[in-house]
Amino acid sequence: MMELYLDLLSPPCRAVFLFAKSLRIPFEFKHVELADGKQTPSCIIVKKVPVLKDGDFVLTER
C-alpha cells in the first residue's frame, strides 16, 4: 500500500491528503513533524514533505 508522509499543518500536505481522500486512493498516513527536530524517516532525504512512498519508489519535493 502507498504511504504518504505528511505534516497536516503544511498547506501542500493538506492538498495531497485531501486529493487522495477525495479520489479514494488507498494510502497509509504517516504523520511527520519536521519542525519539532525529532528524527525523520529515512525516505525523507531532503527533509521536505509531502513524500509518497510505494514499494521501492519514493517521490519527494526537490
Image (cartoon, helix red, strand yellow):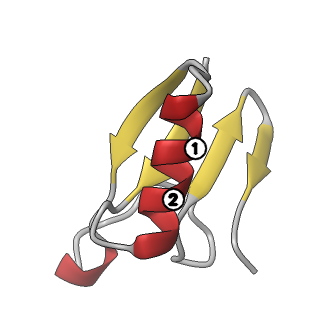
Q: Position of residue 30 (x, y in %)?
A: 37, 41
Quadrant of the image containing the N terminus: top right
For the question of whether residue 43 can be seen, the reply is: no
What residue would you read off at disc 2?
15
Q: Amino acid at mark 2?
A: Ala
Mark 1 and mark 2 in contact (Cβ < 8 Å)? yes
Instruction: Tell me if mark 1 has few (under 14), some (14-19) or many (20+) residues whose alpha carbon lies within 10 angstroms of its own.
Output: few
Q: Amino acid at mark 1?
A: Phe
How many labels, in total? 2
**In the image, residue 18 lies at what x, y percent?**
47, 45
Is 8 rendered above or below residue 22? below
Q: Residue furthest front?
A: 22
Q: Which mark is residue 47?
A: none
Disc 1 target residue = 19
Identify which residue, 19 or 51, lies in the foreground.
Answer: 19
Give the residue drawn at x 70%, y 73%: 61
User: Is 16 displayed left or right of 58 in the figure?
Assistant: left
